[in-house]
Amino acid sequence: MKILTHLAAMAVLAGSAHGLQDREITFENTELRGGIIMISTGMGGNLGLFMGEDGLLLIDDLLPGTGPLVEAAIAEIAGEGVPRFILNTHWHGDHIGANPHFHEAGSTIATHHNIRTRILEADDEWIQDEGYLPLLTFGSDLHFHMNGETVRAIHVPAAHTDGDAIVHFETADVIHMGDVLFSGLFPFVDLQSGGTVEGFVAAMETGYAMAGSDTQIIPGHGPLSTREDIQASIDMVRATQAIITPMVEAGMSLDDVLAAEPLADYHDDWNWGFICTPRMVATLYHDAAGTADGHPLATSCD
Ligand SMILES: [Zn+2]
């Protein structure tokens, strides 16, 4: 079942940094098993909402300044808009953006330890607000026992960042992968936030192993997925890595590798606006080369 919620324009606090000023957001809500709703907007990470008699648990909370709209969208679904708990799957702005709004409203925010550290140490202007900080942090895992469900968040190290969590709703058999799954899309591996290609693949393998053939999988970005979509992403990253790594070992520069268009065969299936094919090349190049200051987003999509 899909429910479309259309909410009006708003002034976004940190909008200029995210190109969101006065934009409308359409919330597309997909009802999964066990009182879990996947919320997609097409302009940031996918949210997971879990409803029941013990209250709301929200997995990730969209871009800075979107708090009032996220609250309104949740209220339309659940009758109340402020989650009892929020779990951030990692520290990127399109997954923690409404933390200050919900912190102020009384939600308790939980994250991996490294996310709190990243937020405290970040220089970026948008994140200079104590409301982003989690009140609870965890190491290897955290379990929520609520709404008749065991919700298990496990840390997957050095993957998309150094603070990623995969969230498994065990009875409902629903998984939120955070940004260790860009379903059908070239992934962003944030090498400067502690991400690595090896850890990214290992995290996808962990998610695959947690899933069964019928598991409903919410990716950080992309449509509702199955474990076959995880496998397709694993296969693509392995195959593209096997193309780029020998070029790095042969001593080629990033410019020379880009000029050779080595991932042309993957472009039509995996290219998208944020991680275009040249940025996927750059990701694999910097990861293999161990380029300390290499950043995939420094490569142009043109
Ligand atoms: Zn991310």
Image: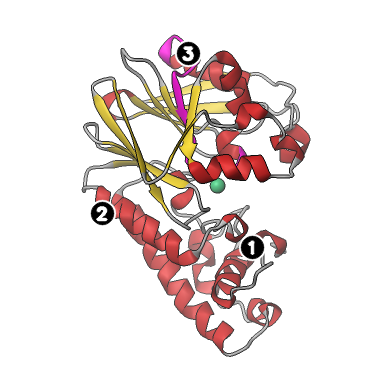
In the rendered structure, find residue 296 and report the number of the disc placed on it: 1
Please tell me which residue lies in front, 247 or 274. Answer: 247
Q: Give, as a three-letter code, the residue at label 1.
A: Pro
Mark 2 or mark 1, earlier in chain: 2
* Quarter of the figure with residue 280: bottom right
Which residue is depicted at the point 55% across and 73% down?
Answer: 264
* Quarter of the figure with residue 100: top right
Q: Nearer the viewer, mark 3 or mark 1?
A: 1
- Whether tag 3 and tag 1 are in contact, CB under 8 A, the answer is no
Please tell me which residue lies in front, 118 or 302. Answer: 118
Pointer 2: what residue? 209
Verify whether residue 100 appears in magenta: no
Mark 3 or mark 1, earlier in chain: 3
Residue 145, compared with residue 274, is above or below; it is above
Specify whether 67 is left or right of 149. right
What's drawn in magenta, residue-wise?
Answer: 78-93
Which residue is depicted at the point 27% across and 26% down?
Answer: 34
